[in-house]
Amino acid sequence: MKFEKTGDSCDISNKGKSCCSTTIETNNEVNFKEHWDKAYLNSPENKLGWYETDLSPMLKLILKTGLSKSARILNVGAGSTTLIDKLLDIGYSNIIATDISEVALKKLEIRIGNKKAKYIIDDLTKPSKLKNIKPVDLWIDRAVLHFFTEENEQNAYFDLLKSKIQNGGFVILAEYNLNGAKLCAGLPVYRYSKEMLTEKLGNDFELINSFDYTYKMPSGAERPYVYTLFKKINNEYVK
Ligand SMILES: C[S@@+](CC[C@H](N)C(=O)[O-])C[C@H]1O[C@@H](n2cnc3c(N)ncnc32)[C@H](O)[C@@H]1O
């Protein structure tokens, strides 16, 4: 695997240049675990291209679910996000953070402590430990699904998701929208509209709320996202 460090562009035509405060992967055979571990090792958390100081768009959707503070929440591709700190502050007490990067989860665990949340290292596109967890009330994904550019990766992700949401449970997906950049963290991304996400989730999920949101990176660059909240409905009685 080869990394290059050069300019500051996030356009696919600039393959080989830096993006999102890290570098663009130049080898087709990407070792994703290694890629993400390096990203978290090479940069202070608050300089990462996806670091957030304003969590309000995500919190708005989480509060809209009306879930109790003991709800089982799974933050996928959590990295070292401060969303977990915020959820604990608000009073949510049953949180699982999962990520492919051991480095990221270790940073999170050191900051938060190993008693306040659970941590699972796993690959969402080839899940092993995640297959064995009990269903959750809320699945949260910010800036993770859009890295899965291959159909088999997307299918594995949605199969896992669909098998792990309780009836009446919720899913929040916040991904680069169709106006978003084509690369992030040195990797190509697959951009979404709310219609595309609705189709991927299928008939058992109802779109409750969605909005576009422009995230400002620590560098000042803007990245347009689509935020979506879905509810799992019980279709058994629907004719
Ligand atoms: C752009 S970061 C977003 C991190 C976090 N969700 C946030 O909003 O700060 C993408 C995250 O997805 C994780 N990730 C990428 N591919 C993954 C995979 N196949 N399985 C699990 N996590 C993955 C990365 O390690 C990284 O932490």
Image (tube, rainbow, N blue to C red):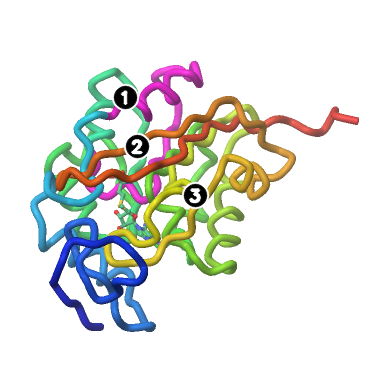
Discs 3/1, front: 3
Spatial separation of the CA atoms under disc 3 and disc 1: 22 Å
In terms of image quarters, where does ligand 1 lie? Answer: bottom left
Spatial separation of the CA atoms under disc 1 and disc 2: 12 Å
Amino acid type of the residue that numbered disc 1 sits on in the rendered structure: Ser
- Which residue is identified by label 2? 214
Classify mark 3: helix, strand or loop.
Answer: loop
Please indicate whether residue 137 sits to the left or right of residue 103 in the image: right
- Which residue is identified by label 3? 178
Q: Is mark 3 within 8 Å of ligand 1?
A: no
Please indicate whether residue 201 sits to the left or right of residue 157 in the image: right
In reply to whether residue 66 is colored magenta, the answer given is yes
Instruction: Name the residue located 28 percent from the left edge and 66 percent from the top edge.
Output: 186
Spatial separation of the CA atoms under disc 2 and disc 3: 12 Å
Mark 3 and mark 1 lie on one chain; the one further toward the N terminus is 1
Residue 93 got which mark? none
- Which residue is identified by label 1? 56
Judge by depth and name the residue closer to the eye, 211 or 171. Answer: 211
Amino acid type of the residue that numbered disc 2 sits on in the rendered structure: Thr
Classify mark 2: helix, strand or loop.
Answer: strand
Q: What span is in magenta?
A: 55-81
> Circles 1 and 2: CB distance less than 8 Å?
no
Quadrant where the image shows the N terminus: bottom left
Instruction: Name the residue located 35 percent from the left edge and 34 percent from the top edge.
Output: 95
Judge by depth and name the residue closer to the eye, 105 or 135. Answer: 105
In reply to whether residue 235 is colored magenta, the answer given is no
Residue 39: x and y in percent read 19, 62
